[in-house]
Image (cartoon, rainbow, N blue to C red):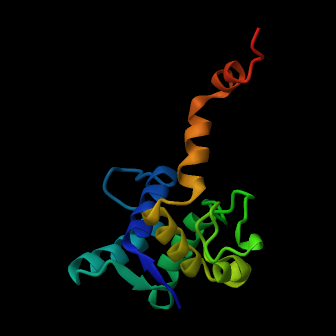
Amino acid sequence: MAAIHITDIEAAINHWRRRAASPDGITLAPELRALAEVYALMVYWHEDEADEGSFPPAALAAWLAWYDSTPDTPCIAICSTSQGDDLCKGCGRTFDEVQFWPGMSPGEKRTVWRRITLEHSAWRFNRYAERAAEGPSTRRASNAPLL
């Protein structure tokens, strides 16, 4: 089983805070309580990862509900592994990660997401992010014919 990073637990907690706000400002929704217990133990033991298989059922269910709200794949439809690269220039995954992605567990997928996000070298994090930030009007003007 893969390890789930504490930042994913934090993201899941924030997801549930938005979805299941406290009715009285004191009580937590069951999903929040389950995730908070795992988070507190991780902080107490100075752990930044927890084994996916060791999660209590309620915490795992809450984490999986958050996970289902995230993009399934980092693919941007520019796969250089099909051209022989060991590491895809588009998404940052290895050839094996691309090939075995459908069979990976949610924890394994999040581990890959974390690695490629920290590396921040794939095109999904630079070229296309910059281009999207330009906006359509800027691109149209720069592609206009010269008179």
Nearer the observer, 61 or 118: 118
Left or right of 126, for residue 17: left
Nearer the observer, 131 or 49: 131
At a point 59% along the width and 75% down the height, the residue shown is 109
Locate residue 19, reporting x and y percent.
Answer: 52, 53
* Residue 35 in sight: yes
Locate residue 10, reporting x and y percent.
Answer: 39, 64
- Quarter occupied by residue 122: bottom right
In the image, farthest residue toward the top: 147
In the image, farthest residue toward the front: 147
At a point 21% along the width and 79% down the height, the residue shown is 44
At a point 70% along the width and 83% down the height, the residue shown is 100
- Number of numbered discs present? 0
* 80 in relation to 18, above or below: below
* 91 in relation to 49, above or below: above
Locate residue 3, reporting x and y percent.
Answer: 46, 84
- Quarter occupied by residue 26: bottom left
